[in-house]
Image (tube, grey):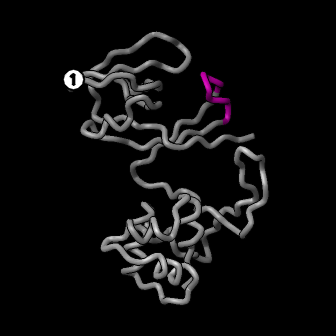
């Protein structure tokens, strides 16, 4: 079995020691290194433990012939943009039932025409995770409000719509979706 443990670990900017410590139960950096390089056989149990430590799905750690990973062409930091020292790839996000998309047809605020926002739906008990972030809020009659969630009370939300400046205070809705990822076409 060919794994992508190393690539996912590096994409998460974690060391072998950090992943080993995050495993339940904890293991050694040497064991994680052997699993990454294939010198030790990776079982389903190990895949699940490492996936939990890396906060990904176990399937994201296995290279499948029908799934293309994205090759890392360059690394950008304060010193500039350089080629990676070792071949690397990132695992494209997999959509799940909690994701919804917002397509930007006309530029608003920091968003450009053609942008797509991937948003994760949250139930009211999890709304606090979205404070200070851009959210999509369902409104009556099939409309939506999109803006920054500035306030949260047990019975109301305070949202600043993108580009308007007028605060909206509305009743707590059955769900809202917090923007997680921006996909920008150039």
**For residue 71, side relative to residue 137 (left or right):** right
**For residue 20, side relative to residue 173 (left or right):** right
Residue situated in front as seen by the camera: 105 or 118: 118
> Total marks drawn?
1
Dominant SS in magenta: loop
Residue situated in front as seen by the camera: 37 or 109: 37
Q: Position of residue 12 (x, y in %)?
A: 53, 58
**For residue 6, side relative to residue 139 (left or right):** right
Quarter of the picture holding the N terminus: bottom right
Residue situated in front as seen by the camera: 171 or 72: 72
Residue occupying image coordinates x 39% and y 22%: 150
Q: Position of residue 87 (x, y in %)?
A: 72, 69
Q: Position of residue 118 (x, y in %)?
A: 52, 43
Which residues are the magenta region? 106-114
Outermost residue toward the top in this view: 166
The residue singled out by tag 1 in the image is 155
Residue occupying image coordinates x 72% and y 54%: 75
Label 1: state its secondary structure: loop
* Relative height, residue 58 to residue 72 (above, below): below
Classify 10 Å Cα crowding around label 1: few (below 14), some (14-19), many (20 and above): few
Q: Is residue 79 magenta?
A: no
The answer to which image quadrant residue 126 occupies is: top left
Residue occupying image coordinates x 38% and y 66%: 22
The answer to which image quadrant residue 113 occupies is: top right
Q: Is residue 110 magenta?
A: yes
**For residue 160, side relative to residue 45 (left or right):** right
């Amino acid at each position: 079995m060919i794994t992508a443990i190393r690539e996912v670990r590096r994409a998460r900017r974690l060391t072998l020691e950090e992943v080993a410590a995050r495993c339940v139960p904890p293991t050694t950096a040497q064991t994680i290194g052997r699993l990454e390089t294939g010198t030790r056989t990776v079982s389903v149990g190990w895949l699940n433990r490492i996936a939990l430590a890396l906060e990904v799905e176990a399937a994201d750690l296995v290279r499948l012939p029908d799934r293309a990973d994205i090759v890392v062409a360059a690394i950008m930091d304060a010193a500039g943009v350089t080629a990676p020292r070792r071949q690397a790839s990132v695992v494209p996000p997999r959509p799940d039932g909690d994701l919804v998309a917002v397509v930007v047809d006309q530029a608003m605020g920091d968003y450009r025409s053609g942008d797509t926002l991937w948003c994760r739906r949250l139930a009211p008990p999890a709304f606090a995770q979205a404070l200070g972030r851009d959210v999509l809020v369902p409104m009556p009659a099939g409309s939506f409000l999109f803006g920054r969630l500035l306030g949260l009370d047990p019975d109301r939300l305070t949202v600043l719509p993108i580009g308007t400046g007028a605060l909206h205070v509305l009743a707590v809705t059955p769900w809202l979706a917090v923007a997680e990822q921006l996909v920008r076409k150039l």
